[in-house]
Image: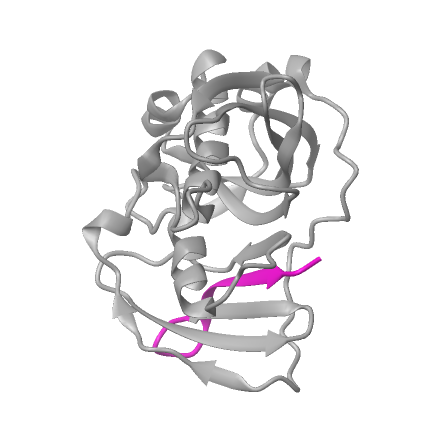
Amino acid sequence: MYSFSSRIRYSETDEQGTLSLVSLVNYLQDCSLFQTDELGIGLDHLAQKGLAWLIAGWQIQIHTLPRYGQDIVVSTWPTRLQGVFAHRNFTICSPDGFEYVRADSLWFMFDFAKQTPIVPPAEEWTPYMAQVGESLDMPKTSRKLRIDATLKAVTKPSFVVSEQNLDTNHHVNNAQYIEFARAAAGDLSQLKRVLVQYVFFATLGDTIVPVVYTSNEGTTVSLNGTDEKPYAIVKFLNA
């Protein structure tokens, strides 16, 4: 397990003074990157080899959200490698162990020269082996999210990807998709769980069209391209 401590900054909070959803996801993402750096297989190492770990999906369970000024401990550990997919768990807790958030995630290694996912070479996975831990008690994280075809689709205004949305892979950062979906979804005051499927990466200048579907269980947002194919699907669930 790898952990780091932090304090919720005002710039990381929403209108209620609690940790915003995009900041929450950034904490999880940063924790995983800090672990790779500590193991000596971080961003610079991967860039030299033309490789990157890309995320395929999230399942995030929210018990409650920490507020401005509260201290937190963010932790992560890999749970297993299954085919090309590596499973990674996370928690955000108070220093005394109260759990605010737990999450599961699916990652894959991408070879930029081949432009395809690959099974991680032994030298890229072996450093994680000593930190592999038990999986959290969570439902199985689905690789594919389905949209109920009977639900009414509401198309929201489109927007164009800008430089501030990109990460070092020159793709839209995974947390940004969740923020795009949150902005389109409307009221999320009852939010307890977030499911995300990343389908294809958006890049600078791409147009994204949010399409929103609402049901009793929550809100689903499909972030589509102009061809109506999704870049990502995000489900905000009330339970």
* Position of 14 relative to 202 (above/below): above
How many numbered marks are there?
0
Q: Is residue 115 visible?
A: no
**Rendered-image quadrant of the C terminus:** bottom right
Image position, residue 87 (x, y; %): 65, 36
Q: Nearer the viewer, residue 159 or 132?
A: 159
Q: Is residue 21 magenta?
A: no
Quick check: 196 left or right of 167? right
Q: Is residue 150 visible?
A: yes
Image position, residue 180 (x, y; %): 38, 60
Q: Quadrant of residue 161?
A: bottom left
Q: Nearer the viewer, residue 148 or 203?
A: 148
Q: Residue at x 42, y 35 (%)?
A: 52
Quick check: 163 left or right of 103? left
* Position of 152 relative to 186 (above/below): below
Q: Nearer the viewer, residue 176 or 200?
A: 176
Image position, residue 95 (x, y; %): 58, 17
Q: Residue at x 30, y 74 (%)?
A: 158
Q: What stretch of residues is rendered in magenta?
A: 224-239
* Position of 134 relative to 208 (above/below): above
**Rendered-image quadrant of the N terminus:** top right
Q: Is residue 232 magenta?
A: yes
Image position, residue 30 (x, y; %): 43, 29
Q: Residue at x 45, y 40 (%)?
A: 19
